[in-house]
Amino acid sequence: MTTIPPGDVPSCGSDDPELARFRAGPGGPVDHARIERAVREILFAVGENPDREGLLDTPARVARMYAELFSGLHQDPRVHLKTAFTEKYDEVVLVRDIAFHSVCEHHLLPFMGKAHIGYIPDGRVLGLSKLGRIVEVVSRRPQVQERLTETVADLLVEELGAKGVAVVVEAVHTCMTIRGIRKPGSECVTSAMKGLFRSNVSSRAEVLSLIYGRRSS
């Protein structure tokens, strides 16, 4: 890996509004009764009878489902980054194939896939499970994939102070596969490169090779 003098390491700072929302604190609790009333109205609106046997408990089930799927709105992922360990290690740390599911904010349909997270420590490393926990919290909210990718990267930059952060997310969006254009098999790939991974071509090539190299074998 190419070595960059300490003075030449670029800043990884971020003004991500998503992180600002976390700093302001979590939102209020989920209003189950309000969701249930809304689901009943939707069932009426599409020509169904919400009082028939098969749908009687559906509004309550949907309310519980949304509380689970959107639980990340009321959690702060930074709590998982508070504990780091001092280590003299300055090469790539990568956890790939972190499974996740989220909900597209445009149609409230799920998208799911895998996240790959790499970083170059600056004297401090995380427990590997913490990267999975960050993805779990950030993914559980209505959003777009681009924002999810940037938010995870910016969290690592701000809370860990890594020299470089790389986040690649691959996902299948049901808003594209089961409705509208209906293209099953399509996949969306997004990436966020911070610090050395953005400024140094060889560092970026290294982390991408670690993520994707095994697929060509």
Image (cartoon, helix red, strand yellow):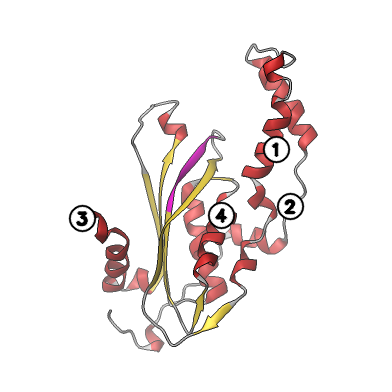
Answer whether labels 2 and 3 touch (C-beta < 8 Å): no
CA gap between label 4 and label 2 equals 18 Å
- Disc sitting over residue 27 in the figure: 2
Residue picked out by circle 3: 216
Side of 57 where 128 appears, left or right: left
Furthest-left residue in this view: 217
Q: Position of residue 82 (x, y in %)?
A: 62, 74
- Identity, as a three-letter code, of the amino acid under mark 3: Ser
Direction front: furthest residue: 53
Tell me: residue 125, above or below residue 106. below
Q: Alpha carbon of mark 1 to alpha carbon of mark 3: how far?
A: 42 Å
Which residue was labeled with disc 1?
A: 64
Q: Nearer the viewer, residue 45 or 94?
A: 94
Q: Tell which tag, 4 or 2, sits nearer the viewer.
A: 4
Identify the mark nearer the N-term, 4 or 2.
Answer: 2
* Residues marked 4 and 3 touching at CB (< 8 Å): no
- Determine whether the residue tagged by mark 3 lies in a helix, strand or loop: helix
Give the left or right position of residue 198, taking residue 79 as reference. Answer: left
Q: Which residues are magenta?
A: 109-114
- Whole-Å distance between the Cαs marked 2 and 3? 44 Å
> Dot 4, how many residues are within 10 Å of its Cα: few (below 14), some (14-19), or many (20+)?
some
| Image side of residue 49 versus residue 144, left or right | right
Determine whether the residue tagged by mark 1 lies in a helix, strand or loop.
Answer: helix
Rendered residue at 60%/76% (across/down): 83
Residue 83 badge: none
User: Residue drawn at (47%, 56%), measured in percent from left and top?
Assistant: 149
Q: Of discs 2 and 3, which sits in the foreground?
A: 3
